[in-house]
Amino acid sequence: MLRAAEDAVSKGDVEKFYNVTFAIIQHVEKFYNQDTDVISAIQYRSDLSVAVDKLSDIIEIKSISDACDKVRYGRIMPDSIAMSADFEILKRLLPRTYKNR
């Protein structure tokens, strides 16, 4: 899936990138044992039992998830700079996710 995301970035295919990214995020969320509601709530609640070292990753996941929703449901198309930045975050998150299993 990461190769498909990279291919979409190189071709400037915003819709494909964020659809593939959404699928990747679903797998990453499973690693963190967080469902979508918990990741959404993380911004508003301080009493969630989340390890501090995972908190910044979860916030980044939430940010990319929001971008996916904007493209998938709102038809808002980020520019290539925003898409590339999200891809860099995704690449940084994935090795940490699978390394820590």
Image: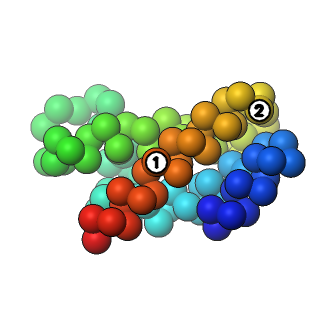
The residue at the point 49 percent across, 36 percent down is 63
Nearer to the camera, 23 or 93: 93
Amino acid type of disc 1?
Answer: Arg
Crowding around mark 1 (Cα neighbors within 10 Å: few <14, some 14 to 19, many 20+) is: few
User: On screen, 82 above or below 12?
Assistant: above
Q: Nearer the viewer, residue 101 or 29?
A: 101
Q: CA distance from mark 1 to mark 2?
A: 18 Å
The answer to whether the residue labelled 1 contacts the one labelled 2, judged by CB atoms less than 8 Å apart, is no
Amino acid type, callout 2: Ser
Q: Secondary structure at mark 2?
A: helix
Q: Position of residue 88 (x, y in %)?
A: 56, 42
Left or right of residue 17: residue 41 = left
Instruction: Say if residue 93 shows up in the picture.
Output: yes
Q: Nearer the viewer, residue 25 or 36?
A: 25
* Residue at the extreme bottom: 101
Q: Is residue 30 above or below residue 71?
A: below
Pick the quarter of the image with the N terminus.
Answer: bottom right
Q: Specify whether residue 62 is in view.
A: no
**Residue 80, labelled with which disc?**
2
* Residue 51, percent from left and from top: 16, 48
Task: Classify mark 2: residues with Cα within 10 Å, few (<14), some (14-19) or many (20+).
Answer: some
Which residue is the site of mark 1? 92
| Callout count | 2
Identify the residue at image location x=31%, y=59%.
Answer: 32
Q: Nearer the viewer, residue 56 or 43?
A: 56
Image location of residue 58, percent across then percent down: 35, 44
Q: Residue at x 37, y 67 (%)?
A: 98
Mark 1 and mark 2 lie on one chain; the one further toward the N terminus is 2
Relative to 11, residue 80 above or below: above
In front: mark 1 or mark 2?
Answer: 1
Q: Secondary structure at mark 1?
A: helix
